[in-house]
Image (spheres, grey):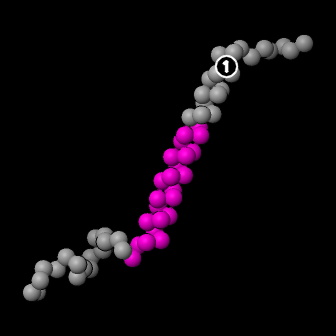
Amino acid sequence: MELHKEHELHKRRSRSNYMILGVLLGFVGLIFAVTIVKMQHGDTMQAYDHTVRQSIVPEGN
């Protein structure tokens, strides 16, 4: 005989919690993948790095 019987509400909450965990892990994975792709193509990124960038220097200077 089982001493502690789990209520059906707890089973639904557990399922819901696992679904939320899956969504959050998917979101973290997506952000990680976007970060990796951006880092691999870093040569095309333009950031403020205290150097003169020829792409923004006006013509004639």
Q: Is residue 22 magenta?
A: yes
The residue carrying mark 1 is: 10
Q: Which amino acid, by three-letter code, is at mark 1?
A: His
Q: Residue at x 48, y 53 (%)?
A: 31
Q: In the picture, which quadrant includes the C terminus?
A: bottom left
Please, which residue is most extreme toward the bottom here?
60
Give the structural element (helix, strand or loop) at label 1.
helix
On screen, residue 43 versus residue 23, left or right, reads left
Q: Residue at x 31, y 71 (%)?
A: 46
34 in relation to 6, above or below:
below
Q: Is residue 60 above or below residue 13?
A: below
Quadrant occupied by the N terminus: top right
Residue 33 percent across, percent down from the top left: 51, 58
- The boundaries of the magenta stretch are 21-43
Residue beneath the point at 23% across and 78% down: 55
Q: Position of residue 9 (x, y in %)?
A: 65, 16
Closer to the camera, 49 or 58? 58
